[in-house]
Image (tube, helix red, strand yellow):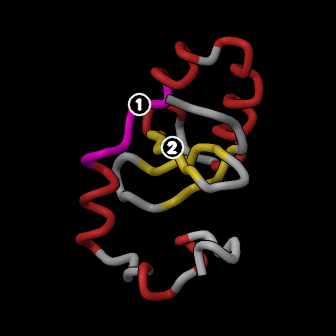
């Protein structure tokens, strides 16, 4: 499937439930939104718009890089609950 262009994320055998354990792992791995803004000053407005769109205070938002064969971006995470808030399509460290 990979040779045919199917990304790993489209293959259900690699999916897992979004349960309490997954949320704990995400909260432990996610990075502060302030770090993203510092490392990408040219994209600060885009980051701030994405953060505002979540309805959650900026100090509570964390992020994780999301990588695929065709695009990159960041997943915005609620640092308290571990819930996914939004996706922002740009490269992040």
Question: Residue 92's spot in the image, x, y percent?
Answer: 56, 32
The tag on residue 80 is none
Q: Which residue is mark 1?
A: 32
What distance separates the C-alpha of mark 2 from that of mark 1? 12 Å
Check if residue 2 falls in the magenta segment.
Answer: no
Residue 32: x and y in percent read: 41, 31
What range of the chain is rendered magenta?
Answer: 28-33
Quadrant location, the N terminus = bottom right
Q: Nearer the viewer, residue 70 or 79?
A: 70
Please state which of the two labelled residues, at mark 2 or mark 1, is closer to the viewer: 2
Q: Is residue 70 left or right of residue 23?
A: right
Q: Position of residue 93 (x, y in %)?
A: 49, 29
Q: Is residue 56 left or right of residue 59?
A: right
Residue 17 or residue 34, whichever sits in front = 17
> Quick one: label 2 or label 1, which is nearer the N terminus?
1
Nearer to the camera, 1 or 88: 1
On the image, the x and y values in percent for residue 23 come to 32, 64
At a point 32% along the width and 77% down the height, the residue shown is 19
Q: Secondary structure at mark 1?
A: strand
12 vs 9: above or below: below
* Residue located at (55% from left, 45% from top): 56
Q: Is residue 88 above or below residue 8?
A: above
User: Residue 62 occupies which quadrant of the picture?
Assistant: top left
Quadrant of res 48: top right
Categorize mark 1 by other alpha carbons within 10 Å: few (<14), some (14-19), many (20+): some
Q: Residue 65's mark?
A: 2
Q: Does residue 39 appear left or right of residue 60 in this picture?
A: right
Q: What residue is at 57 percent from the left and 56 percent from the top?
A: 85
């Amino acid at each position: 499937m990979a040779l045919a262009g199917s990304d790993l994320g489209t293959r259900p055998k690699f999916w897992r439930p979004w349960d309490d354990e997954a949320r704990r792992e995400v909260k432990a791995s996610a990075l502060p939104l302030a770090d993203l803004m510092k490392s990408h000053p040219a994209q600060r407005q885009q980051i701030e718009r994405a953060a505002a769109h979540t309805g959650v205070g900026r100090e509570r938002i964390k992020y994780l890089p999301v990588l695929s064969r065709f695009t990159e971006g960041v997943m915005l995470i609620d640092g308290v609950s571990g819930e996914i808030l939004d996706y922002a399509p740009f490269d992040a460290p």
